[in-house]
Image: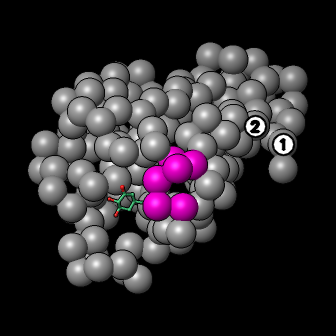
Amino acid sequence: MRYNASPNLRSEIAVAKPIYVLNGPNLNRLGKREPEIYGTTTLAEIEAACRKAAGHWPLHFHQSNAESQIIDWIHEAIDAGAGIIINPAGLSFTSIPVLDALKMFAGPIFELHISNIHRRDEIYHHSLMSKVATAVIMGLGADGYATAVEAMVRRLERPS
Ligand code: DHK
């Protein structure tokens, strides 16, 4: 579903704060990485799907294998973003610094996992991030990203 904003909403969106889509370690290998778990969709294809789902809403899409870089993008979003969609990947289960950074973000936070972590090994069952997430989306495969972006746009446009 492509989002078509009315003219005056389009002008509002023109100055809207961007949605940040952040991806953690090893997600740059999507397409080749454990396709039986993560599918064969590449991160570039996921980015394209996110931009299509966002329509006119501005969107920043990033991936890093470095915890500090993920934190720097969260800080950027704290100052300039409307919403965060984050797949912290393996950092979900280990990173208190990422959790602490997310705690400082005032807007909606959607935690996203391509796989259903509760159907995986025990080590993947307890995400530290879920306690600050507005919503958690998992198990939809790569399609979960466009679903998350559409839901974020709806939430950001729903008058508070
Ligand atoms: C991605 C990872 O890299 C794993 O560490 C997580 C998550 C699951 C995903 O499903 O997107 O356990």
Q: Is residue 16 visible?
A: yes
From this view, report whether residue 62 is shown above or below residue 45.
above
**For residue 119, side relative to residue 82 (left or right):** left
| Relative to 121, 5 lies left or right | right
Q: Element under label 1?
A: loop
Residue 126 in picture, x, y percent from top left: 24, 72
The residue drawn where x is 36% and y is 78% is 120
Left or right? Give the position of 141 relative to 13. left
Q: Which picture quadrant has residue 25?
A: top left
Query: Which of the pair 75/145 is nearer the observer?
Result: 145
Q: Mark 2 highlights which residue? A: 52
Give the CA distance from mark 2 to mark 1.
Answer: 7 Å
Q: Position of residue 143 (x, y in %)?
A: 66, 58
Image location (x, y in percent) of residue 84:
44, 41
Q: Main secondary structure of the magenta part?
A: loop
Let me know if residue 34 is in the magenta part: yes
| Residue at (30% x, 36% y) in the render | 65
Can residue 107 be seen by looking at this rendering?
A: no
Whether pointer 2 and pointer 1 mark residues with C-beta atoms closer than 8 Å, the reply is yes
Element on which disc 2 rests: helix
Q: Which residues are magenta?
A: 30-35
Quadrant for ligand 1 reads bottom left
The reply to whether the magenta stretch includes residue 103 is no
Q: Residue at x 26, y 27 (%)?
A: 69
Q: Quadrant of residue 101?
A: top left
- Sooner in the amino-acid sequence: mark 2 or mark 1: 1
Instruction: Identify the disc placed on residue 2.
Output: 1
Q: What residue type is disc 1 on? A: Arg
